[in-house]
Amino acid sequence: MRKILFLQKSDFTFIITEEFLKVRSNIENTPTLLYNVAMKYYTPLKVRTYECDSYGHVNNAVYLNYLEYGRMDYLQQIGFDYNGILEAGFYLYVTHVDIHYKFSAFFNDELTIETSPIKLGAVTGTIHQRIVKKDGTLCAEADVTWASVSKDGRPSKIPENFLVEGLRPDSSDIKS
């Protein structure tokens, strides 16, 4: 199993795999980290009453909506031109969601949807997402695979001009 280090700095979390971690000491013997990182993007959300089921917690299906909301916000944060890719005749379809529910969220809970790109190919990509309560409790996490398709529904290479920097994981194979 790979060791992964998480560093929190302001609004960003850096994910560092052991393979890419190198430590270099500066003159004052303070370690300087040199690494390839995958950025996390954050989307805040507050649970609304209509998202809760008869048990009083967020219905499992609603988490998929939260993930979609987080992905769309992530695309906006990285400067991805979603309207432009639609106008160019391409769509981004979700092709697979592998979600694991960990802990219930309830009405008025303040949640954060963390989104990180972990894989990008010519036609498909995978995004890792976590839904976390304000106190740090993990409610759910998922790997979401998407594909670029043309208007006729055929898999199509993503046009180069839409491959903005935040769409690419900063290192290959951050998460295996």
Image (cartoon, rainbow, N blue to C red):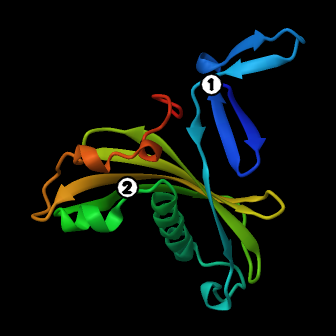
Residue 33's image quarter? top right
Where is 64 relative to 163, above or below?
Answer: below
From the top left corner, tell me how far across and down residue 145 is, in percent.
Answer: 38, 51
**Badge count:** 2
- Tell me which residue sits at (76%, 19%) in the image: 32
Determine crowd level at label 1: few under 14, some 14-19, many 20+ residues with C-alpha closer than 10 A: few
Specify the farthest residue to the right: 28
**Which part of the image, by quadrant, shows the N terminus?**
top right
Q: Which residue is mark 1?
A: 2
Q: Is residue 111 above or below residue 14?
A: below
**Amino acid type, callout 1:** Arg
Q: Position of residue 63 (x, y in %)?
A: 56, 70
Q: Quadrant of residue 146?
A: bottom left
Q: Is residue 57 visible?
A: yes
Point 60% across, 48% down: residue: 40
Which amino acid type is marked by label 2?
His
Q: Are marks 1 and 2 in contact (CB under 8 Å)?
A: no
